[in-house]
Amino acid sequence: MEKKETIQVAVLGAGTVGTGVYKVIQNLQEDMPHKIGSNLVISKILVRDASKKREGIDQTLVTDQWNTIIEDENIDIIIELMGGIEPAKTYITEALKAGKHVVTANKDLIAEHGKELLDLAEENSCDLMFEASVAGGIPILRPLKHCLAGNHMTEVVGIVNGTTNFILSKMTDEGVGFDETLKLAQDLGYAEADPTADVEGLDAARKVAIMASIAFNSRVTFDDVYTEGITEITERDIAYAEDMGCVIKLLGVAKNTAGGIEVRVHPMLINKRHPLASVNDSFNAVFIHGDAIDDAMFYGRGAGELPTASAVVGDVIETARNIQNHCTGKIACTCYKNIPIKPMEEIESCYYVRLRVEDRAGSLASIASVFGNNHVSIEKIVQKNKREEFAEIVVITDLVKEKDIMNSLAILRTMPLVEKISNVIRVY
């Protein structure tokens, strides 16, 4: 069958990642005939303001008119890098209906509307690729779909937000507080002016939903993911973790259990011997467990102009190869199961609980009694610091259900001897 001499693409968005994709594709022009069997050229770049000059980008390619792209029959692939739900969802929908293939880095859209768009791609025999939506330049989605398809996956856990990992790494290494470290992250460009999506765990939750859907072949959406951020983590918690041979990381955890799929994002104490404990600064890593492969970890740059562009262009090349070999649409939605989402209150974890209590005889026994009466077994309880009439204690529990620890804490908060429950962090 005849192959194309040139495959044309259009890029939607010329921000950080869009500019990176432009650079990478231009840099690979001599290699493209060997990689895909044809030339690959960017025909148009859609932006909001076409009059704005963009350094390093050919201004003749820039347009603010979507119709000039969707109506151009010569454009084969749409690269969506606008972010957000709309107008990206509308543009991708129209592109797939027009028989154009789509590559996107849009985690918000895939986490909430992935099934709908994948079904539409299948109906139109189109490719819809989204490797860059999770962990930037680290290959994880394609390995889960291809290389690891011979496994029943039982766990995917990862550090998938570079901003929070940078903040926690700096707090750990330099003993500084959250607010100071967040400002540093903003000054260095790791955090946005409004860092909510990062520090509250929302960005990571979207990525975990996508990974869990692919790993467990069952639909998981953003709304299914229990989410906590890192804003309550203090230098004291980090110091106590150090004493226990642990570090604190914001982890995305997805497990396929007999009781359903667990999906959650929150800070956790993790033993320094675990491979994820050594992932620092803005790096990301995803640790997986499958019945055939056992354990494996994927590590690298989780964001940034060129790392994310690397994943996007990898998808573009894969799509171009499929076009040349007339095998587009070969992998549609892989969520052929319907596994229930396990309620958070039924999930089991170990817990670190830091409290301030009256420093008098019987206080520890009273606290231990509350935990015991609520089916919470204590691994250790340590009195750490005393100030005036109060002492700070740290409790580490054995594996217990979320509902039991929360019932215990609700009772403790009503007790006069407990001045404050300073923090509660799960232990991996």
Image: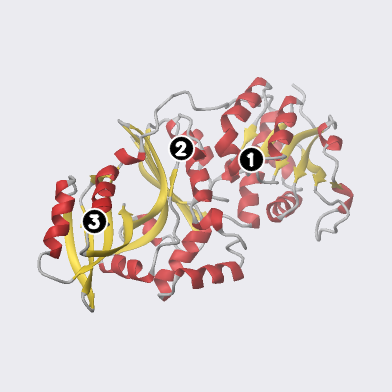
Which is closer to the viewer, label 3 or label 1? 3
Residue 279 on image: x %, y %? 43, 60
SS of the residue at dot 2?
Answer: helix
Task: Tell me the crowding category of disc 3: few under 14, some 14 to 19, or many 20 or more residues within 10 angstroms, Cα based.
Answer: many
Residue 31 on image: x %, y %? 72, 46
Which residue, given by chain and number where applicable, does mark 1 sit on? 315
Give whichever of 362, 181 is nearer the camera.
362
Give whichever of 165, 226 is nearer the camera.
226
Discs 2, 1 touching: Cβ within 8 Å: no
Q: Report the amino acid beneath label 3.
A: Leu
Q: CA distance from mark 2 to mark 1?
A: 27 Å
Of callouts 2 and 1, the N-terminal one: 2
Of callouts 2 and 3, the N-terminal one: 2
Q: Report the amino acid beneath label 2.
A: Asp
Residue at 49 percent of width and 54 percent of height: 200
Q: Report the amino acid beneath label 1.
A: Asp
Q: Is residue 111 visible?
A: yes
Q: CA distance from mark 2 to mark 3?
A: 29 Å
Which residue, given by chain and number where applicable, does mark 3 sit on? 412
Task: Tell me the crowding category of disc 1: few under 14, some 14 to 19, or many 20 or more residues within 10 angstroms, Cα based.
Answer: many
Of callouts 3 and 1, the N-terminal one: 1
